[in-house]
Image (cartoon, rainbow, N blue to C red):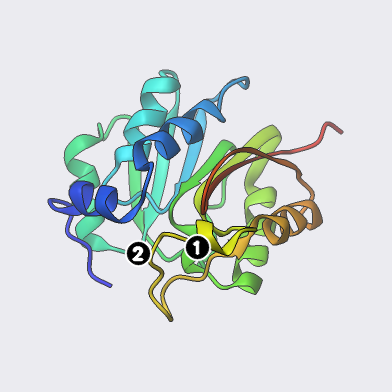
Amino acid sequence: MTWDPDTYPATIRDEIHDYDELQEQVVTATSGISVRNILELGVGAGETAARLLRAHPQARLVGIDSSEAMLRGAEEILSPQRATLLLQHLSAPLPERRFDLVVSALAIHHLEGDAKADLFRSVRNCLAPGGLFVVGDVVVPEDPEDAVIGNEPGYDFPSTIDDQLRWLTEAGFLARVVWTCRDLAVVRAEVPPP
């Protein structure tokens, strides 16, 4: 799939119902911890990153994405003093450093189930003590009538909330759902205290 950062804001709002509310809920779910270092998985055109950096003014962000075009779009709206952007797929090894906060909005559903579970373990390993992982994404809802977002076969692989909570628990997180709307959900996964 090819994304265009110039048309992405309109396209994503056409495709994802309640997109702006999802963004708001993702950022709200990151509150309550001291954040200096953020890792964003699937930075896209930089909209979530910009919101996160406003919410955490002392933080720096590392954003990864597999699209060169989207990273160029993100570079246009993010300060290079506060954001480092890397061309990389979600299945590649994560940056070798510790983060206080890892966030992903509308990216992880592009991974199949086993790859999601692997990613959740990798995220757990790169979080500092007291760290937090927030995921806002497309899910398979309990009620089939709530599945209103069009998923492209072979490209979109949404999972149930229960599966994602299980994989997060298996990875060592204390995870809970903080928001849902039809086939969208936000999950807050905390590193348990020692």
The single residue placed furthest to the front in the displayed view is: 145
> Looking at the picture, which amino acid does disc 2 mark?
Ser
**Quick one: SS at disc 2?**
loop
The single residue placed furthest to the bottom in the displayed view is: 154
**Quick one: SS at disc 1?**
helix
> Is 4 placed left or right of 171 in the picture?
left
Q: Position of residue 175 (x, y in %)?
A: 73, 42
Residues at marks 1 and 2 touching, judged by CB atoms closer than 8 Å: no
The single residue placed furthest to the right in the displayed view is: 194
> Is 122 placed left or right of 147 in the picture?
right
Quadrant of res 188: top right
The residue tagged 1 is: 109
In this orientation, which residue lies closer to the viewer: 46 or 130? Answer: 46
Q: Quadrant of the C terminus?
A: top right
> Is 70 placed left or right of 39 in the picture?
left
| Vertical side of 165 occupied by 116: above or below | below
Q: Which mark is residue 51?
A: none
Depth check, mark 1 against mark 2: the one in front is 1
Which residue: 36% across, 22% down? 54
Which residue: 44% across, 39% down? 22
Which residue: 36% across, 37% down? 49
Q: Position of residue 107 (x, y in %)?
A: 44, 57
In this orientation, which residue lies closer to the viewer: 101 or 145? Answer: 145
> Looking at the picture, which amino acid does disc 1 mark?
His
Query: Mark 2: few, some, or many residues within 10 Å (few <14, many ≥20)?
Result: some
Which residue: 69% across, 58% down? 121
Query: Mark 1: few, some, or many residues within 10 Å (few <14, many ≥20)?
Result: many
Q: Which mark is residue 66?
A: 2
- The residues tagged by marks 1 and 2 sit, at their Cα atoms, a distance apart of 14 Å
**N-terminal-most mark, 1 or 2:** 2
Q: Quadrant of the N terminus?
A: bottom left
Q: Position of residue 62 (x, y in %)?
A: 42, 43
